């Protein structure tokens, strides 16, 4: 195994962040309660493995926990092998296991998904934006106040700039 680290004097390329993006999409589609926010990670490097997929390493800013992901978005956990010919090995694991091993449940606010029959249906909490149903003009704020117990929730905006190119 050989470790590659991103250069400090060059902008990051989109390809370097694609594995984390794929894992983030999988976390949402599988409704994991701990979201993977790209801007909360830093790219540590990539482990080059002969005959096997390279593994990208992303460290979480808050706790230093590492997500290990290959270029197709498959996740791994690192298993130390004291006394072995190498320092350890990467073993494939479920995304939930990788998120847990990285310690995200300790530092990431969980997201709970509500089950509803239809995204636009009368039985669900969501309504079409053009459907005000006779409510006051600020219906979204009204619903937020009801759900949050009177206070509007704090909205955190995230920003990440990725540059295409390179391979």
Image (tube, rainbow, N blue to C red):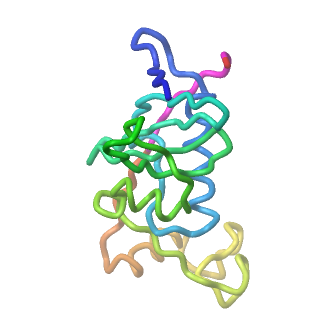
20 up-or-down from 161: above or below: below
Q: Which residue is farthest top?
A: 9
Who's the residue at 29% across and 57% down the image? 107
Quadrant that contains the C terminus? top right
- Residue at image position (32%, 42%) is 83
Identify the image quadrant of residue 165: top right
The answer to which quarter of the image holds residue 134 is bottom right
Residue pictured at 57% horizontal, 27% vertical: 162
Q: Position of residue 23 (x, y in %)?
A: 58, 51
* Residue 102 lies in the magenta stretch: no
Image x and y of residue 113, in percent: 53, 75
Residue 26 lies left or right of residue 152; in this view the side is right
Q: Is residue 161 magenta?
A: yes
Magenta region, main secondary structure = loop
| Extent of the magenta region | 158-166
Spot occupied by residue 90 in the image (x, y as percentages of width and height): 50, 46
User: 151 or 64, which lies in front?
Assistant: 64
The vertical placement of 137 against 116, above or below, is above
Viewer-closest of 91 and 56 = 91
Decide: is 117 above or below 110. below
């Amino acid at each position: 195994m050989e470790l590659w680290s991103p250069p400090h004097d060059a902008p990051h390329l989109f390809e370097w962040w694609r594995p984390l993006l794929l894992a983030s999409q999988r976390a949402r589609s599988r409704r994991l309660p701990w979201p993977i926010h790209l801007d909360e990670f830093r790219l540590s490097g990539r482990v080059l493995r002969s005959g096997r997929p390279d593994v990208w390493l992303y460290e979480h800013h808050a706790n230093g926990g590492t997500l290990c992901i290959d270029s197709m978005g498959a996740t791994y956990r690192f298993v130390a092998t004291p006394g072995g010919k190498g320092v350890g090995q990467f073993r494939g694991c479920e995304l939930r296991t990788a998120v847990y091993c990285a310690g995200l449940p300790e530092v990431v606010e969980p997201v709970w998904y509500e089950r509803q029959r239809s995204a636009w249906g009368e039985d669900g909490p969501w309504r079409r934006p053009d459907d005000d149903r006779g409510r006051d003009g600020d219906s979204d704020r009204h619903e937020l106040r009801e759900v949050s117990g009177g206070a509007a929730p704090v909205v955190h905006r995230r920003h990440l700039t990725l540059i295409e190119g390179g391979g």
